[in-house]
């Protein structure tokens, strides 16, 4: 029973704690209160060692709250003997690397609950690297071996810069080999990183020794002569110390040599031997070279085809260029095998041999020579692949072979399997040194009619040529000419061909009337017509062609003139005369006139007066002409129906025959009535009869009712009354008196 005591609660909770005190008298008292037991925080930390500066360690608090959630309020670190820190995440530089240290962290929360975490911090030592490398000859790989301290460390990555500009090479291995592309001295850098991320570097010079450069040359030995070899090797900074030759002649007992300038005898036939020379210098570096060495034959067949191109059906010539190299003997036979079934054999040396290949194609020509050397027979064959190209076929046509006109030539040449690409024309004009052309289809103007020899040389794309000469006739061309009548607007203009033929009959006419507003202003008639719709100048072109295909052209400018406007009006019953009309001319722009009255009469007056005598319909035509004699026509129809009724005012029964009766004169009446009365109103005569022309049939003879057996009426004045209707339905208005009035009754005087 202690006055002050402690107690370790087994769980986090609220506890009611009682304290009972008793004095010496045995009296006691008790007090109680609630005590809350909190959870403690959990102290923890991590750390990281840095490479620079050496010994630097960064500590990181990883402590957590207790379950009561009380925040931490203080941190107490013991990082080294005698070194403390209250930072949350402190750092510290230790003096000794590659050693271990005891580090503790005590954390306190706001409930003043604490917890302590203790850990051992072991530091890695500072890494250092180095390497060694072999000195090698060029084309040998250089071996690099890396090393590091401290030995308990471990390198994660080795990074090599070989000093020749190549990319840095990274590897986890401490040994690497590298092949340099050229000899020389290189500064090599090594940068290594250990497992802790710390790096160290080192560099050294590395030497790659140059190789010697082997080389040699030989002379060309023929037949049984020895071949000499001449060393051309260089040491590249040091001396050559050894030579080793392999002459590529394994069947020979002397196929190898260590001399600097050896010789070797090859067999008599021509061949190529591959000779190897290996040289080494004083640095121990060596290199070799293999070169072909030609051993010349005792006899060599060779020939050339000359003067290309090589064309079918034309001579192809060959030149013999065979050689004999033996010390004795010579060539005794030469053979040409042309590949087309033909062979030529010569026993004396030929110079130039020509042969004709009839057909195009590819031919293998063989040239064989036979020789004797010291009693031994030798032969050699040369081959030539010869392409015989097809020879083109020259041909041409000529057109428009006319003097003073361009004669056109059309090449009809055929490539015969090739393509014609060149044309050389000679037009046979001895008067002109420049009568040539290189066009495919040229033209030429001959200076005179006659006969000319025209030559065409064609060349194909393979260079082969062919020549053709034809004789052509150049004819006299016709002479174009024409005339035309006056050309008036919207009136057909007539054109008359007046061309003159020369060498042959003209058979074709091509007219162009120069009407820019029409697409159909042409004709192929000899004497055409054309109607212009615009006034002004127009260029008319006539091209004629005769049976010799000779052309001639003429152009003339014609003026198209405006036309007058013909018109007139008819003034009927002119001067109060039935059947008489005035033709009042209202034409504009005319100077002369031609009238046709439709009754067989004509006139050239400006406004003529015409009198028609008979009923009918008359077509009146006016043709008006301007100063260029361009006409315009106006036509009107005039219909005349003569109608009228005339009543005489006296008659004489015993006078002249035409005066013996009182006879009304009229025409074209369909109804008529007349009566005569005495002054006292007694009717003495009447009539309604008409003939077929609508004319009164009867007249009054002075007797009552014309009865000569009746009453003879006395002389004196009588009253007549009349009415009439004409065939056109009009009514007779009466007789016109002097005061301009019409009357249907009047006085007739009977005279005896």
Image: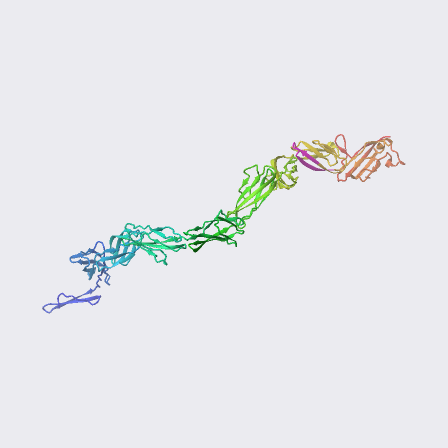
Quarter of the image for residue 619 reads top right
Image position of 691 (left or right of 29): right
Image position of 597 (left or right of 57): right
Q: Residue furthest left?
A: 24
Image position of 542 (left or right of 11): right
From the top left corner, tell me how far across and down residue 125 is, in percent.
21, 57
From the top left corner, tell me how far across and down residue 24 is, in percent.
9, 68
Residue 225 visible, this angle: yes
- The magenta region covers 621-639
Q: Residue furthest right?
A: 709
From the top left corner, tell me how far across and down residue 269 is, in percent.
41, 55
Q: 674 or 191: nearer the eye? A: 191
Residue 59 visible, this angle: no
From the top left corner, tell me how far across and down residue 66 is, in percent.
23, 62
Q: Residue furthest bottom?
A: 26
**Dominant SS type (magenta):** strand
- Is residue 633 within the magenta segment? yes
- Is residue 299 within the magenta segment? no
């Amino acid at each position: 029973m202690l006055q002050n005591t402690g107690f370790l609660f087994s769980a986090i909770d609220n506890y009611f704690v009682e304290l009972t005190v008793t004095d010496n008298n045995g009296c006691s008292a008790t007090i109680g209160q609630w005590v809350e037991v909190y959870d403690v925080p959990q102290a923890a930390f991590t750390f990281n060692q840095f490479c620079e500066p050496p010994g630097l360690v960064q500590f990181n608090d990883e402590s957590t709250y207790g379950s009561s959630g009380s925040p931490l309020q203080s941190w107490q670190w013991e990082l080294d003997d005698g070194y403390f820190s209250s930072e949350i995440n402190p750092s510290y530089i230790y003096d000794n690397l590659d050693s271990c240290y005891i580090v503790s962290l005590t954390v306190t929360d706001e409930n003043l609950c604490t917890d302590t975490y203790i850990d051992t911090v072991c530091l890695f030592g500072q890494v250092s690297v180095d390497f060694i490398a072999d000195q090698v000859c060029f084309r040998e790989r250089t071996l690099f071996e890396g090393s590091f301290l401290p030995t308990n460390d471990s390198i994660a990555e080795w990074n090599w810069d070989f000093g020749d500009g190549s990319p840095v090479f990274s590897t986890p291995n401490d040994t690497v080999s590298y092949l340099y592309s050229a000899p020389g001295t290189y500064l090599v850098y090594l940068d290594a990183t250990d497992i802790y991320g710390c790096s160290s570097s080192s560099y050294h010079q590395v030497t790659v020794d140059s190789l010697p450069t082997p080389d040699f040359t030989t002379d060309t030995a023929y037949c049984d002569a020895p071949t000499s070899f001449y060393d051309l090797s260089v040491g590249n900074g040091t001396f050559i110390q050894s030579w080793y030759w392999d002459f590529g002649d394994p069947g020979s007992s002397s196929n190898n040599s260590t001399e600097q300038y050896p010789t070797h005898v090859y067999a008599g036939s021509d061949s190529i031997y591959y000779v190897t020379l290996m040289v080494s210098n004083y640095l121990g570096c060596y290199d070799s070279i293999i070169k072909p060495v030609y051993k010349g034959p005792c006899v060599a067949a060779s020939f050339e085809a000359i003067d290309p191109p090589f064309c079918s059906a034309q001579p192809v010539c060959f030149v013999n260029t065979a050689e004999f190299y033996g010390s004795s003997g010579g060539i005794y036979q030469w053979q040409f095998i042309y590949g087309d079934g033909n062979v030529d054999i010569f026993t004396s040396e030929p110079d130039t041999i020509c042969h004709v290949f009839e057909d195009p194609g590819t031919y293998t020509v063989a040239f064989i020579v036979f020789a004797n050397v010291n009693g031994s027979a030798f032969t050699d064959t040369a081959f030539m692949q010869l392409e015989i190209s097809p020879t083109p076929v020259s041909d041409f046509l000529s057109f428009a072979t006319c003097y003073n006109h361009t004669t056109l030539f059309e090449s009809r040449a055929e490539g015969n399997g090739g393509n014609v690409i060149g044309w050389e024309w000679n037009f046979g004009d001895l008067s002109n040194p420049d009568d040539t052309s290189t066009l495919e289809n040229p033209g030429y103007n001959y200076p005179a009619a006659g006969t000319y020899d025209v030559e065409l040389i064609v060349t194909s794309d393979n260079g082969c040529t062919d020549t053709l000469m034809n004789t052509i006739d150049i004819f006299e061309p016709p002479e174009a000419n024409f005339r035309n009548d006056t050309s008036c607007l919207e009136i057909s203009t007539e054109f008359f061909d007046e061309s003159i033929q020369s060498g042959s009959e003209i058979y074709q006419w091509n007219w162009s009337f120069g009407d820019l507003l029409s697409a159909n202003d042409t004709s192929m008639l000899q004497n055409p017509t054309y109607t212009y719709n615009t006034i002004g100048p127009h260029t008319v072109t006539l091209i004629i062609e005769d049976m010799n295909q000779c052309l001639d052209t003429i152009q003339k400018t014609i003026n198209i003139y405006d036309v007058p406007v013909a018109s007139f009006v008819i003034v009927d019953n002119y001067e109060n005369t039935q059947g008489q009309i005035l033709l009042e001319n209202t034409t504009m722009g005319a100077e002369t006139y031609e009238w046709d009255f439709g009754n067989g009469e004509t006139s050239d007056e400006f406004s003529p007066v015409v009198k028609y005598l008979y009923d009918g319909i008359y077509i009146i035509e006016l043709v008006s002409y301007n100063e260029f004699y361009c006409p315009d026509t106006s036509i009107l129809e005039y219909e005349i129906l003569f109608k009228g009724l005339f009543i005489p005012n006296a008659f004489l029964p015993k006078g002249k025959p035409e005066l013996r009766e009182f006879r009304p004169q009229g025409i074209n009446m369909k109804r008529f009535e007349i009566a005569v009365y005495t002054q006292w109103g007694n009717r003495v005569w009447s009539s309604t009869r008409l003939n077929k022309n609508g004319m009164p049939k009867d007249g009054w003879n002075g007797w009552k009712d014309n009865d000569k057996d009746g009453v003879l009426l006395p002389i004196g004045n009588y009253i007549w009354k009349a009415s009439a209707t004409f065939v056109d339905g009009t009514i007779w208005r009466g007789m016109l008196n002097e005061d301009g009035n019409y009357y249907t009754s009047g006085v007739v005087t009977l005279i005896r």
